[in-house]
Image (cartoon, rainbow, N blue to C red):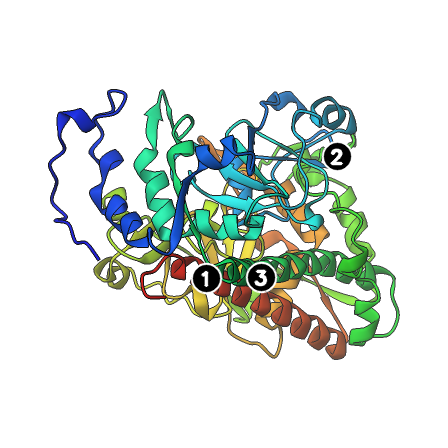
Amino acid sequence: MRRYAESGFVLPATSVKRDIFIPRYYDPRIGGELADLSTTHHLLSLDQLIAAGDIFHDHGKYIPKIYYGTGAFPYIRTSDIANCEIKASPKHGVSQAIYDAYKDENDVKAGDILFVHEGTYLIGATSLVTPYDGPMLYQHHLAKFRVAEKCSFPPHFLLAAINAPLVQRQIRSKQFSADIIDSVVGRVGEVIIPVPKDRDAIIRIANSVRGAVEGRAMMRERLTHLFQAIDVWLRRAGSGNLSDILQWMPDPKDYQGRPAFLGERPSFTAFTLKSSSVKKDIFIPKYYDPSIPTMLTDYRDRCDLITISSLVGDGSISIRTGDEIGRLNYGTGENPFIRTSDLGSYELKSDAKHGVNDAVLSAYPQGIAENDILLVRDGTYLVGSSVMVKAEDLPLLYCGGIYNIQVNNSEKISPALLYAALNLPVVRAQMRRKQFTRDVIDTLGHRLLEVVLPIPKDPAVRSSISDLVELLSTQRVRYRAELDNLFKGMFAIGM
């Protein structure tokens, strides 16, 4: 393989294209690696594939913010894409009327690839639309690639190719600043996709990617429905074994659409409150939402209603915040520095925006371990989101806007049971009501301690929930690791 000096290179003036004077645009290492593949691969640009009718290329539409939260039809934005999929709970939903007004221009179907073509660190991120994702709209910062039936490769191969390091480096080399945002619009078509000349190799790659993508999507939806099923069961069911919980959970094969998510606007409610009931000079009406105590009473027969404060007080759990390591440390190494935007659907992103070196990692001993729970403290729509850390995620650092919840007494409450409780609708609703604006950002602050968790009284129920959440979340992360390895192995010489 060709080698080039890391410090720089010489480029003839005649090779400058369209007055582009950004050195990385001409990175000779990329051309060298592509040349090494030329005997075993067809080197086709996206523009060539589009011109041949093998791929269709479109982009989303801008929808005014006034329509955010008006309904349950997801409006997908760049931050709703993580680990090659769409998040289980996109930030914004729109009404049926808005969906109908834009759906023809925003035509999306299973097998389409959404690609971030405007942003900063997210440029080049992708998601493959699955049957589980249902009808949606997507914003103008996203492009859509649809593989034609006559194409020599299926969409799962294209997803793998775009996420391969060689192609991702091409995308980064084409990135430029447009006003206050970066973009690859107008240049993404120049990106070369190496397509194996061996048809069997294409099918082999596509089938492997398909298995991991579909497996991940199934685990995501089963977790989403499981949390809702647990909630329903705790409020309405009788006996307490695993089969009783499972009967409330829809089979993914019968999936009929994603349930409504937290971004949907609630109907208007008014209530009165005695001045003597005002706590700590808090005059935010939603903090006293009377529907929360009413909801919690539904759990009293089958659950102990336990505050997070009491779990901290008796030593069952510990809560600490992360560190702000300074921007100068970003990009110094491969150890992830987790920020709030690096939380995906029930998992961390595999490609966290920022990495740090071992020295920085050692300078901030955070003591994070497998099965710890990271929960977003500061932000807006992400406040209350959480993930359970797995061995595949470590080592890492996490930022100051995130809480780390560690379980010290798993006999009282296991990490998986606590994680399930934190994702129950009644618990997420409490976090939303306790969220407040501090300076220019929202936060839960210490109000997290006030949140009440419904914990099943029956040990068999607790064990069943814990085992199932652990099984699904672990398998989901394993599928993610499988995908990561597939992407890294693409176009590696000698593989």
What residue type is disc 1 on? Leu
Say whether residue 307 is left or right of residue 335.
Answer: right
C-alpha span from label 1 to label 3: 11 Å
What label sits on residue 424 in the rendered view? none
**Left or right position of 173 against 193:** left
Q: Which residue is mark 2?
A: 266
Q: Is residue 403 visible?
A: yes
Quote the CA–CA distance across marks 1 and 2. 42 Å
- Left or right, residue 243 beside residue 289: right
Q: Amino acid at mark 2?
A: Pro
The residue at 61%/71% (across/down) is 470
Q: What amino acid type should be assigned to the residue bearing mark 3?
A: Asn
Circle 1 packing at 10 Å, graded few (<14), some (14-19), many (20+), is: some
The residue beneath circle 3 is: 207
Q: Please rate how many residues cluster around mark 2, counting C-alpha atoms within 10 Å: few if below 14, some from 14 to 19, many from 20.
A: few
Residues under numbered marks 1 and 3 in contact, where contact means CB atoms less than 8 Å apart: no
In this view, 341 is above or below 52: below
